[in-house]
Image (cartoon, coloured by chain):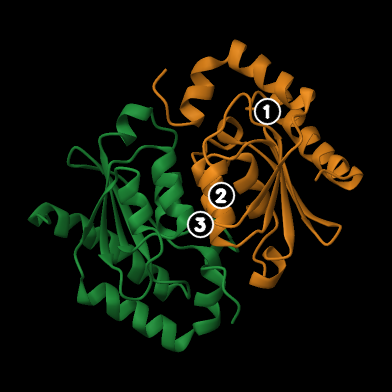
Chain colours: A orange, B green
Amino acid sequence: MITDDDRSFLGLAIEQARIGWEEGGIPIGAALVHEGEVLAVGRNRRVQLGSAIRHGETDCIENAGRLPAKVYRASTLYTTLSPCFMCAGTSVLYDIPRIVVGENTSFEASESWLRSRGVVVDLVDDPVCRELMDTMMREKPDLWAEDIGEES
Amino acid sequence: MITDDDRSFLGLAIEQARIGWEEGGIPIGAALVHEGEVLAVGRNRRVQLGSAIRHGETDCIENAGRLPAKVYRASTLYTTLSPCFMCAGTSVLYDIPRIVVGENTSFEASESWLRSRGVVVDLVDDPVCRELMDTMMREKPDLWAEDIGEES
């Protein structure tokens, strides 16, 4: 179930996605929230940092720094796009119990696996998230292929 | 099947693990090899960089920089320790077809999942890799718990 708070935290992730796009990057953002407190936000920084591992979710988790297991286990990860297997695997490593997904029309790979591991995956299906991805996939298809390990 | 070349490339990963331990970090290392050429090495840098995402394998993949999909798809990832789900998920994202694992006695989480996704996982069962982990788990159990998202 998506609450007003969820929409508000997803808004922080969307803001990160927009910043990333304005920087010339891939418009995907994330936020990590622990019991109502925002621990970190992050965005895909493949272009900005020449990175192969800084997706929105992993950048956010990296920005949150080293955390005790019990914090991850009581946190929710917000992401504008359904997570790839790297980001899903990172969530599973740290036992993050819930992921709120902005949209999964542009890309979806890991949701059934996450659910099979006990993760709650809640979909917002947000039109702004979809539009950011639509624009990027139209204007920079090769960059998007690279980001998900596909040949362009 | 493990070849002499595999043992040699695993040796580079072990060297990284030793460097990491001498730095005060977690002794896990990795190497990414494409058609006999070493693209990058890396090591767990949780302590060194205050990082939540720099495991041996992800640090190595990050050090390799942005690569075309076809390079990952013809590469082998060498790691001193069986990959966690973050590192396994990163390999699946990039369709790395083969992972050579130094040892899986200290830790094993993702191997059956990797195989179910078509990844070849070859185990060396190397005593040096085991010894590095044994020492660390004895001397720094809390650090190890943190690295795999467990409560200490």
Q: Residues within 10 Å of mark 3 (few under 14, many from 20)?
A: many
Residue type, label 2: Leu
Q: Position of residue B2 (x, y in %)?
A: 12, 56
Q: Which mark is residue A27?
A: 1
Q: Secondary structure at mark 1?
A: loop
Q: Is residue A108 left or right of residue B81?
A: right
**On screen, residue A83 above or below A66:** above
Q: Please give the residue where the numbered disc 3 appears in the rendered image.
A: B54
Q: Residue at x 69, y 72 (%)?
A: A70
The quarter of the rendered structure image containing the N terminus of chain A is top right
Disc 2 and disc 3: Cα gap in Å? 22 Å
Outermost residue toward the top in this view: A138
Q: Up-down: is B134 above or below A97?
A: below
Residue lying at 84% horizontally and 37% vertically, measured from the top left: A11
- Left of B68 or right of it: where is A62? right
Residue at x-position 63% and y-position 18%: A136
Name the element at disc 2.
Answer: helix
The residue carrying pointer 2 sits among few (fewer than 14), some (14 to 19) or many (20 or more) residues within 10 Å by Cα, namely many
Q: How far apart are labels 2 and 1 at the CA level?
A: 23 Å
- Please, which chain is the residue tagged with disc 3 on? B
Q: Residue furthest right?
A: A4
| Residue highlighted by disc 2 | A114
The subunit letter for the residue under badge 1 reads: A
Image quadrant of residue B66?
top left
Label 3 and label 1: CA atoms lie apart by: 23 Å
Q: Nearer the viewer, residue A97 or B97?
A: A97
Q: Residue at x 64, y 65 (%)?
A: A66
Instruction: Look at label 3 and name its amino acid.
Output: Arg
Give residue B1's position: percent from left, percent from top.
11, 54
Question: Do the numbered discs 3 and 1 sit on residues whose CB atoms are within 8 Å?
Answer: no
Q: Quadrant of the C terminus of chain A?
A: top left
